[in-house]
Image (spheres, rainbow, N blue to C red):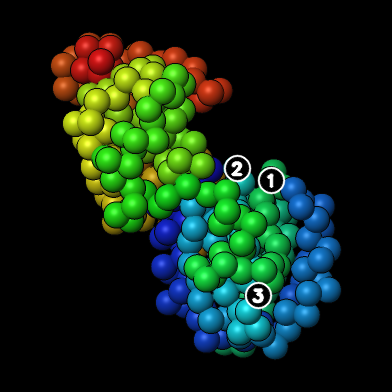
């Protein structure tokens, strides 16, 4: 699943490439998705200019010059590419947005869990109001601080890993980044969130920010389906210390890395380094 760093990387690349372009034509090849794509055909997008491309949580938001936006979520397997018409259509490409500069914004999703919708009721942030109202703070903004994490976690009994992956608390901390930041902070993923001390909450927020920034700098982590806009792969995956290393020795202390299921997601951790 494309996580926050991947979507941030995509948004930055697309922003450079398509802002100012007009949508000249839209083609929908197979409308059955998590939300049907049929409305896109009747949204009168032709002639609209793209004014911004931004990320909120793991959503990609393409702002238009008529105060609407195209909201995309990549689900488990969605991929967006900017390519010319000379590249043959792939089997699972469902939407083509033809741009005035001659390129095509192409949306692929083999498993059809992606979202591509047109919205008009936008908050001042440019994000659909309904979506904005249920999302927590952005992890790379000052709103996400140790003090914030400490205060919202009081009396919370669920495991800290599930807690930091809860989008209503902080957005975009997926399994990879939760796993790695908990290791870096020396905190067991199983600890009840409410037991975090103030210094631990401080350390954990710092590590989450650090690991997300590193991943963005590396262009995302490229686990399984994810690819960049230009088809290249991210370099971050090779630097993961815990994620995907169950049964191997901990890089810090040599103990065997354990793996438990938390909230349906596998969670690797070092029982010695993470308490
Ligand atoms: Zn260890």
Q: Which of 216 and 59 is in front in this view?
A: 59
| Residue that mark 3 sits on | 68
Q: Are marks 2 and 1 in contact (CB under 8 Å)?
A: yes
Q: Position of residue 100 (x, y in %)?
A: 62, 87
Vertical position of residue 47 compared to residue 172: above or below: below
| Residue at 33% from the left image edge and 42% from the top image edge | 148
Vertical position of residue 39 compared to residue 215: above or below: below
CA distance separating discs 2 and 1 = 6 Å
Q: Which is more N-terminal, label 1 or label 2?
A: 2
CA distance separating discs 3 and 2 = 26 Å
> Could you tell me if residue 246 is visible in this image?
no
| Residue that mark 2 sits on | 76
Q: Image quadrant of residue 60?
A: bottom right
| Residue that mark 1 sits on | 113
Q: Image quadrant of residue 76?
A: top right
Q: Image quadrant of residue 81?
A: bottom right
- Left or right: where 84 falls relative to 234: right
Label 2 Cα crowd, 10 Å radius (few <14 / some 14-19 / many 20+):
some
Q: What element carries label 3?
A: loop
Q: Which of 243 and 211 is in front in this view?
A: 211
């Amino acid at each position: 699943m494309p996580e926050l760093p991947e979507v941030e990387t995509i948004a930055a690349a697309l922003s450079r490439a398509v802002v100012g372009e007009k949508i000249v034509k839209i083609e929908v090849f197979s409308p059955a998705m998590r939300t049907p794509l049929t409305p896109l055909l009747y949204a009168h997008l032709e002639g609209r200019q793209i004014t911004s491309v931004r990320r909120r949580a793991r959503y990609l938001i393409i702002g238009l010059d008529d105060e609407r936006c195209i909201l995309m979520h990549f689900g488990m397997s969605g991929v967006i590419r900017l390519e010319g018409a000379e590249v043959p259509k792939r089997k699972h490409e469902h939407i083509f947005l033809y741009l005035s500069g001659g390129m095509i914004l192409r949306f692929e999703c083999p498993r059809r869990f992606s979202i591509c919708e047109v919205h008009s009721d936008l908050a001042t942030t440019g994000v659909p109001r309904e979506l904005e109202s249920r999302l927590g703070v952005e992890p790379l903004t000052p709103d996400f601080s140790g003090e914030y994490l400490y205060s919202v976690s009081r009396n919370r009994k669920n495991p800290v890993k599930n807690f930091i992956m809860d989008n209503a608390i902080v957005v975009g901390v997926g399994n990879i980044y939760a796993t790695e930041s908990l290791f870096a902070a020396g905190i067991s993923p199983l600890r009840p969130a409410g037991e975090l001390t103030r210094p631990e909450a401080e350390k954990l927020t710092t590590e989450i920010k650090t690991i997300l920034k590193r991943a963005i700098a590396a262009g995302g982590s490229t686990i399984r389906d994810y690819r960049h806009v230009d088809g290249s792969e991210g370099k971050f995956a090779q630097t993961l210390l815990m994620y995907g290393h169950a049964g191997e020795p901990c890089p810090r202390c040599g103990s065997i890395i354990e793996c438990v299921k938390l909230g349906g997601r596998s969670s690797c951790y070092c029982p010695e380094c993470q308490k």
